[in-house]
Image: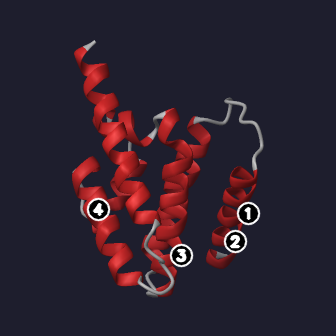
Amino acid sequence: MLRRDFISKIIEQMLNAIARLMKIDNEKETEKFLGVFDEILKTYYDLHSDEMDNLLLPDEKRDAILLDEKLKNFQLRMFVQAGFAYLKTDDLKQAKNCLSIIERIQNEHSDVFEFPTEEHKKLKEDIEKLRERLG
């Protein structure tokens, strides 16, 4: 019970952090966006952005947050925006890591039906745009 309450509190805090990140225009304020993104990675995953590929490996502690159903769309949006920001800075390796993490999150929740909303549709379109740009 304590562990679940602790994770719920972390998820709540992370939702707030992602909401703040999404207010930053990743096109116009790319460096600021990536700086805040790096802070989120450090705070919630205990990683620096250059270690982001570790999110592709199973890790119980990190996966409790990365693969949480409540955070799914928020994290997908965060990694999509980070992928575009890395493309803008010509960091293809990090942009590809973002796409791989997106795919990992999607695969984890592939059996969960989600009622299609405008936001969900836009998210899927943005993921496809990122995939196309990474060719």
| Distance from Cα at disc 3 to Cα at disc 4 | 18 Å
Relative to 21, is 6 on the left or the right? Answer: left
Upstream in sequence: badge 2 or badge 3: 3
The picture places residue 4, in percent across and down from the top left corner, at 31, 20
Q: Amino acid at mark 4?
A: Glu
Q: Residue tagged by mark 3? A: 84
Q: Which mark is residue 51?
A: 4
For the residues labelled 3 and 4, say whether their Cβ atoms are less than 8 Å apart: no
Residue 104: mark in rendering: none
Q: Earlier in the sequence, mark 3 or mark 4?
A: 4
Q: SS class of the residue under badge 3?
A: helix
Give me the C-alpha separation between circle 4 and circle 1. 27 Å
9 relative to 63 in the view: left or right: left
**Which quadrant is home to the C terminus?**
bottom right
In the rendered view, would you say 2 is above or below 19?
above
Disc 3 or 1, which lies upstream in sequence?
3
Q: Residue at x 65, y 62 (%)?
A: 127
33 vs 85, left or right, is left
Nearest the viewer among 119 and 58 is: 119
Q: Is residue 19 above or below residue 90?
A: above
Q: Which residue is mark 2?
A: 129
Q: Nearer the viewer, mark 4 or mark 1?
A: 1
In x, y percent, where is residue 22?
Answer: 47, 64
